[in-house]
Image (cartoon, coloured by chain):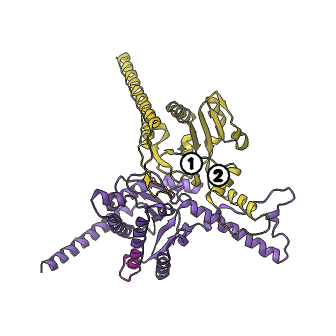
Chain colours: A purple, B yellow
Amino acid sequence: MTKKIGDQAGKMFEYFGSFLRKCIFSVLSVGPVPDHIAFIMDGNRRYAKKRNLLDGAGHRSGYLALMNMLKYCYELGVKYATIYAFSIDNFRRRPEEVQSTMQLILEKIEDLIKEESMVNQYGVRIYFLGSLKLLSKPVRLAAERAMVATSGNSKSVLSICLAYTSSDEILHAVQECCGEKWDEGSALESKGAGNGLVFLKGNENGKIKPSIVVKDLEKHMYAAVAPDPDIIIRTSGETRLSNFLLWQSANCLLYAPPILWPEIGLWHLIWAVLDFQRNFSYLKEKTKLS
Amino acid sequence: MVIDSEEAQELSKVFELLQWVADIGVKSVCLYDPEGVLKKNKEPITQRFSSANLSEEAAVNGRLVTRRNLTLEFVSFEDGKEAVAKAANYLFVKHYANGTKEKSDFTEPQMAEALGAIGSGGAEPDLLLIYGPTRCHLGFPAWRLRYTEIVHMGPLKSMSYGSLVKAIFKYTMVHQNYVTSSCGTSMMRKIDLTDAASIVCILLRMFFFDCRTKVKRYLLACMSN
């Protein structure tokens, strides 16, 4: 009986919270709403240490905070969200830590593709960005399953950066462009066009005509599934990007609240959006110029 | 330093900022603005620092200038994404020019070498100070921004020596996890004796600069009364 009353009270509290959020978001939506917000979820381990929790508990708390933040973003009308889940540099951590993090990631990917999850509730399509071949087979297969399972969703997009760094992304794009240009040239050569390998051997002046341009590289970036982010939020007060979306963040507002990731809440998101709205015209002008 | 292009036109402020940075003891400054205003004004900036000598590298790419112990580098938006595209073409010609497709993936050192070859190489800054209305790096070359600490200093017109010193001091206290593959342990950025001495010098300079400013204001107030 007491439990039933408690459940009902919890539901009422949730409805009230949801109503309050709708009111706040209606006011915020009077101004420009960011299309894409990216998150660097820093501070999970420090949170666990601060609260004397077991290893891994910080990441679990971080996951709950993430689900809340994504819910707030999609309710506000932010269409794209990107999260920095696991960097290539993180593979150098203690093997036990990497193993437990991978286990948690696997578990949460399975949770995400369940019918009743937030992802299906908000019509979110999931992409996994990064060098997925570096992941273990179970995690890689789970990621592929999640991408297929949510391919029919079209309301919003969640990009999860796994085994990702910007430098690896740029190298991958360069590699793909070179491979593409080679294939184009070889195809022309085999058709007997004769000019296929001009860009390889050079013209009469000995100078090679550049054939790879910025647009070609951008087409092959992992993050090409979404537009450039409007805001990058990194928690724990750290002021560096740690090899995350460096190519895409040229005209992006960088926001670094001094709280640990599991402590992030609605007010931090509201503050970030207000900051974005205050600087919107300046950022828009810079985007046009570039 | 990233400076908003409109604000970068205020060259007197840029001179003052560089003077402060040189006085603090910084050895190398990379000046970036997206539209290349600082690049176009390289001559007046270098003339201001009258004992400037062009280094060997400047003869190759025209970007580097050395003044006493301060090396200045001038960078703009075209040294970012477009430079990576040029480096991609360089790598394509180098690795595919013999008519066969090499199977191995490009590595970071190869990319760094390619960027250097086309004149857009350069070290990754330890600290990036943004002078402008927004905390945004405005397209600073992505390849050189991986682990750089980024600090927003506000508009250039309201820059202050105290904020500059504070930003540098805060940088010296930053903890970064660098995990080595061999021992698997993390280590803090070490603050050794040299750093400690620098911190003390910075604090002393800050104290004396602050005193000097207060004395000046007091004397001006007395004279006006």
The crowding category of the residue bearing disc 2, from other C-alpha atoms within 10 Å (few below 14, some 14 to 19, many at least 20), is: some
Location of residue A254 with respect to A228 vertically, above or below: above
The residue depicted at 22 percent of the width and 75 percent of the height is A11
Count of marks, rendered view: 2
Q: Residue at the location (27% across, 59% down)?
A: A51
For label 2, the residue is B78
Q: Which residue is mark 1?
A: B124
- Residue A222 drawn at (x, y percent): 56, 68
Residue in front for this viewpoint, A17 or A70 = A70
Q: CA distance from mark 1 to mark 2?
A: 17 Å
Q: Which amino acid, mark 2?
A: Glu
Q: Residue furthest front?
A: B183
Q: Is residue A283 visible?
A: yes
**Is residue B172 positioned above or below B51 on the image?**
below
Q: Nearer the viewer, mark 1 or mark 2?
A: 1
Spot occupied by residue A228 in the image (x, y as percentages of width and height): 53, 62
The circle drawn on residue A289 is none
Secondary structure state at the residue bearing disc 2? helix
Q: Which residues are magenta?
A: A107-121
Q: Which residue sits at x=68%, y=60%?
A: B88
The spot of residue A276 in percent (x, y) is 43, 56
Would residue B162 appear left or right of B123 to someone viewing this image? left
